Amino acid sequence: MLRALIFDVDGTLAETEDLHRQGFNRAFRALGLPWHWSPELYAELLKVMGGKERLIHYIERFHGEDAEVLKRRMPEIHDLKTRYYGELARSGSLSLRPGVRRLVEQARADGVRLAVATTTSRPNIDLLLTLNFPQVERPFDVIAAGDEAAQKKPAPDIFALAVHRLGIDPSEAIAFEDSAAGIRSALAAGLPVLATRSRYTQSHRLDGAFSAVSDLGEPDAPHDHLQGHAWPDGIVTLDALRAWHAGHLRGAA
């Protein structure tokens, strides 16, 4: 039985990554740091999972001569970036990706549990959910986020934590991801993965995902099928997920 859907956040639930990039750049300017992350540079930096880890990687790679001094400023930079990210999000720039709200509402109405498994920090998740589900106190049953796992993706820790908190077996859930590292993380935790490409993962290989699509699709705007399992009418629905999942379990038996 399909009992849960587990979502990554950045690039999967919403196209948040460019807001993070803009938040970093605003923090750099405010703190007098002569740095600027272009979309092209940020796409490379996103290969490092986690905003704090990404910032440390950037300092070590591009400012190695001052790395130890600059790394001590990392908490200050990251905290300010989070504040600016929140301001950008509240300005109306943080909407869900196509099909996400529809699928979440279908799952909630039909008793399928919902979880988040992400390397982003808890305040960012809370803000996204508050802005997009203002009438629902807890749209997701479980949130596994940020520094709660010992290792970031592609390690399985954060997905394993979400599965543990849901109290289910990995075979009873489907994970949703947009990045190569996220797919590897979910697979390592024993979860089948449905991949959707996002703005900053256009070049990522989606190997291992049982299906890859441009987005979850809407009745008036079907998605583009990329590889693997194809969905009726170009829309990922809860009924279609259940049908795939039942066949997957039969095939694994």
Image (cartoon, grey):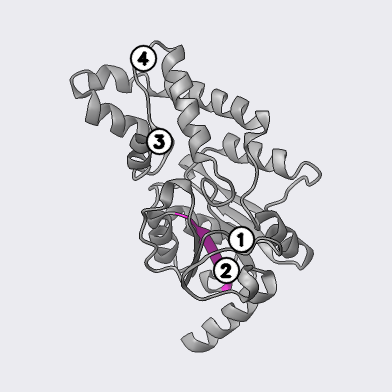
Is residue 89 rendered magenta in the image?
A: no
Instruction: Using a 10 Å C-alpha cutoff, classify the residue at mark 1 as few (fewer than 14 neighbours), some (14 to 19) or many (20 or more).
Output: many
Please state the horizontal and vertical placement of residue 96, each as a whole percent of the image: 64, 47
- The reply to whether discs 1 and 2 touch (Cβ–Cβ < 8 Å) is yes
Q: Which residue is mark 2?
A: 173
User: In the rendered view, would you say 102 is above or below 86?
Assistant: below
Q: Which residue is mark 1?
A: 166
- Viewer-nearest of labels 3 and 1? 3
The segment highlighted magenta reads: 172-178
Instruction: Check residue 177 for magenta coloring.
Output: yes
Q: Is residue 212 left or right of residue 236?
A: left
C-alpha span from label 2 to label 3: 34 Å
Residue type at mark 4 is Leu
178 relative to 191, above or below: above
- For the residues labelled 1 and 2, the Cα–Cα distance comes to 10 Å
Q: Amino acid at mark 1?
A: Leu
Pick the front one: 101 or 247: 101
Q: CA distance from mark 4 to mark 3?
A: 18 Å
Residue 157 x %, y %: 43, 54
Q: Residue at x 42, y 51 (%)?
A: 201
Q: Horizontal placement of 1 versus 111: left or right? A: left
Q: Quadrant of the N terminus?
A: bottom right
User: Distance of mark 4 from mark 1, alpha carbons?
Assistant: 43 Å
Q: Which residue is mark 4?
A: 33
Please state which amino acid type lies under the numbered disc 3.
Pro
Image point 45% across, 61% down: which residue? 186
Q: Which marked residue is nearer to the observer: mark 1 or mark 2?
A: 2
Q: Is residue 111 left or right of residue 182?
A: right
Dot 4 falls on a residue whose secondary structure is: loop
Q: Nearer the viewer, residue 18 or 56?
A: 18
